[in-house]
Amino acid sequence: MDNEKFGKFIKELRKQKNMTQKELAEKLNITDKAISKWERGLSFPDITILNSLAEIFDITVSELLNAEIGKKEELDIEKAIQEAVEKVTHKKEIREKRIRKIKKSIGIISLISFICFSIMQLGYMFLLKKRDYEYAIDILYYIVNEIILFSGIIASILAIQKSKLNKKAVSNIVLLVVFGILTVINFAFMSNNGFDNECIVSFSKNLENKVVLKKDKETGSTVLYRDTKLFLFAKPKEQLEYEIEGEIKTQWLTNDICSITYKDKENITREFVSTYGDRGNGISYYYVTTAIYGNWQLSTQYGNSTQLLADSKGITITKDGKSTLFKYEECKQFGTIAIVLYNNEIPRYIIALNEDCEIDEKTGIIKKGGTITLCEVSMEKTKSESLYCTTYKNANDLSDYNLVDMKANDYTIKNGILYISYDGKNIIEVPGDFSNTESSYNDDNYQISEEKTIFFYTSKGKRYLVYSNDMGKNWETIEISNKSTIQSIQFLNSDIGFMLEFEDVAMGNAYGKISKTTDGGKNWQAICYGIGDNEDKYFKRNTKVEFIDEKIGYLIMPSTGGEKSELYETKDGGQTYSKVTVIESDIYDYYNLPTQENGKLYLKISQGSKGDYNGGDSKTYCSNDNGNTWNEEEI
């Protein structure tokens, strides 16, 4: 006989009669719990009430025992009931065995929990607390207490039930009363002490590092905790500089760099960066500003690319076409892997060295392949950008690493800084602000040589000459007049030099002067105001001057279109000039400045901008007597 089938059959019949379990029980003079057990297959009706039960449902006892209407198969009632009772008893034994097993498991788990959490709590109170460790979240202390109490009471009650004590119920009541009293005390302490601080816990993506912050809800004073143990305990490391008003934003830039952004009492944004790693050997200290020296960029096909430039002026961030310079005194380093850039003492950007960075021990610069993260400081959600270095790096040796790459005896201007190189390898930075000067240079108004290197720049409405007599080891800067443009500068040695300046240009003619210095550029004296008579001295717009020595020099004055040019010679140090005619020709009429080689002067005369005779060729003349006579060179 199937007890479960019988129970479902009874339930269906009861519902067909619109009877509740209680109503059926009253008719049979039994409890509704008995009806519930029948319907769940947990027990079977007594033989004495089978007839009454069948009469209530208007069926036969045979149909009742077969659990099927219309089926009147004769059954041995006593035998069927006996089988049903045996099945119920067997199921009950299995169920009780399962319950005992569950209770045993619960007891073991409770006992283990009680022991483990008790050991942890005792270890905290007598070991970790003496070393200044605290729970990462204050209420955890009281939660652990409650776990100890709860697991202890469960383990004790189950142990008492299994024991041979006579007054088990009394013992259980005593345990429950003790549990209730201790729980009330624990929650009372938690309400007084567990909510004084706002506790913030943030894990890195790989869960290896954790930021723990505790903010005093009353004062806003906030402490950063480090050196976490078992994910639960941490030691106070340092107090944040400003008292906090409102929320705290944490953002992991890498697995070992976490940005902490907040507002102070005056509603000013503040920034702190918690770092947990190193990109060097773990022993040597290095500067992030040195490590990122160079050009960095984010590649994107949409809009303007984010760029970063770290040079001697500071760190320049370019976003959306707008550039902002942050001087190094406005940067604050955190650990050895992050810096914050400030503007008017307000944090603007965070620069983090990514985990693929490796610091070169000799130079302190990030090795080839390392990337950095740039993130704007804001209480709003911000996007971090990974930048790669566009400045060339030798994978094996960074000893000759330079911000710029150039040829020997050349210069370049980058971010308002002028760089020069004498050998094409070593780069020297020229002091001065060259932000407004780059377009003013031509091939003749600066000089790079072993004896004299000289440049000019304008800053705040003033013009300066900056020069070196020892190949960039030492520099000197002097202020000169800013009323003219410098066309050419030439030094014969470290002391004697000549400078051509234009004050006004009109109709292709230029009005200015040639000046001379004999003390390296500190003082200049005008020696010539142009070609022509005393009342009409002028130069041409593209005039060039070249001195062979302190006395002999040459000057060319090209026409406006460059069709031809005139050559002038001075033998009194540039004070007076006389026109030089080497060849009378309407074809070869463009004179270039003579060049000196092996003690000889060479003069090239070409056809000018419109010349096309004989393929636009030119003639070259040579002088062995400093320009007194010229002889055509045969090719």
Image: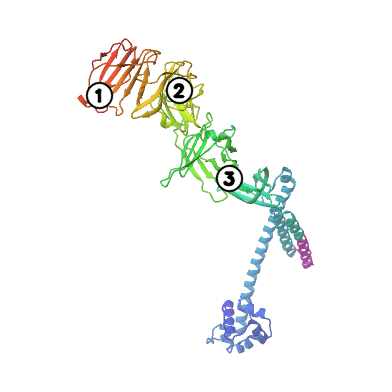
Is residue 493 visible from the viewing direction of this image?
yes
Q: CA distance from mark 1 to mark 2?
A: 33 Å
Circle 3 sits on which residue?
258
Q: CA distance from mark 3 to mark 2?
A: 48 Å
Circle 1 sits on which residue?
607
Q: Main secondary structure of the magenta part?
A: helix
Judge the density around disc 3: few (<14), some (14-19), many (≥20) Cα neighbours within 10 Å: many
On the image, the x and y values in percent for residue 103 come to: 67, 63
Q: Callout 2: helix, strand or loop?
A: strand
Observer-side mark, 1 or 3, equals: 1
Judge the density around disc 2: few (<14), some (14-19), many (≥20) Cα neighbours within 10 Å: many
- Judged from this view, the residue extending furthest toward the front is 535
Relative side of 208 to 584, left or right = right
Q: Callout 3: helix, strand or loop?
A: strand
180 relative to 562, above or below: below
- Quarter of the figure that contains the C terminus: top left
Observer-side mark, 1 or 2, equals: 1
Q: CA distance from mark 1 to mark 3?
A: 70 Å
Picture quadrant of residue 209: top right
Circle 2 sits on which residue?
454
- Tag 2 or tag 1, which sits nearer the N-term? 2
**Which residue is located at x 39 percent, y 15 percent?**
575
- The residues colored magenta run 162-181
> Which sits in the foreground, 180 or 54?
180
| Proximity of marks 1 and 3: CB atoms separated by less than 8 Å | no
Residue 562 colored in magenta in the image: no
Observer-side mark, 3 or 2, equals: 2
Amino acid at dot 2: Ile
